[in-house]
Image (cartoon, rainbow, N blue to C red):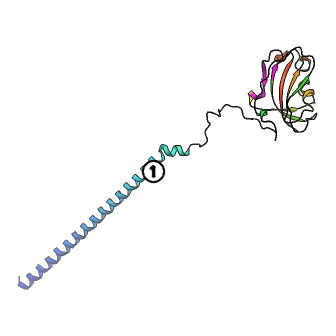
Amino acid sequence: MSEHAGGQESKARRRLAEQLAEQKAAEAKRRRQAWAGAFAAIAVAGVLITVFVIIGQRGDDPSDQVASAPSAAPTETTPQDAPPAPQLPEGSDPALGSKPTVAAGEGELSKLTVTPLIEGTGPKVEEGQSITTNYVGVFYENGEQFDSSWDRGQTATFPIGVGQVIEGWDKGLVGVTVGSRVQLDIPAEQAYGDGAGGRPGGPLRFVVDILAAQ
């Protein structure tokens, strides 16, 4: 082989070696880039997971739970089982907002007796109207309570003067002004008689507040 031919072969080998080296270098660079991208993706995922964990922990924080709780809670001065205060007529005596104390009567009760305790300033109750009341009922002879709208926490509304209630109420409440508190002493014959059927028998005493009439 001539020197010229040997030189060309040597150059070809060097070029081939250089090309192989360049290819290896390029492949190595691509691998490094791929690894770098993978590491970057893992790092981003780690940051996102950390953020979600922190947000979740803050959502469970007791201070957040307290902030979301109702701000108006019942106090010791307003028990949950207390009956609601009645709606009073405009300008009426504030005493109508409290349950009255009712004592036993004295002596023999022979007729219906209406005793004003608080004088209301509203219109007079007319026969056939529906009236809204609060009341306490006791046995006239011993003052033992047998009924009370106050204890139920609910006023009572009914027609008056048309036979829908006992005669003592029909006759004793017509003509009373709205906003009044009256005491009705009712003989047995104008109440429930002898109390048959589990009703209160004998003479009765009621204290009735007239809250509305229409």
The quarter holding residue 208 reads: top right
Residue sitting at the far bottom? 4
Indicate yes or no whether the magenta region holds residue 16. Answer: no
Q: Position of residue 40 (x, y in %)?
A: 34, 61
Label 1, on which residue? Answer: 55
Q: In this view, does 134 lie to the left or right of 66?
A: right
Closer-to-camera residue (46/29): 46
Q: Where is residue 196 in the image (x, y as percent from the top left)?
A: 85, 15
Closer-to-camera residue (117/41): 117
Give the magenta-colored segment's residue range.
Answer: 137-150
Closer-to-camera residue (38/61): 61
- The vertical placement of 67 against 29, above or below, is above
Q: Is residue 199 left or right of residue 53?
A: right
The quarter holding residue 149 reads: top right
Q: Position of residue 176 (x, y in %)?
A: 90, 32
Residue drawn at 82 percent across, 38 percent down = 92
Closer-to-camera residue (43/126): 126
**Quadrant including the N terminus:** bottom left
Residue drawn at 38 percent across, 56 percent down = 47
- The vertical placement of 124 against 141, above or below, is below
Residue drawn at 83 percent across, 26 percent down = 207
Q: Which amino acid does label 1 sit on?
A: Ile
The quarter holding residue 140 reads: top right
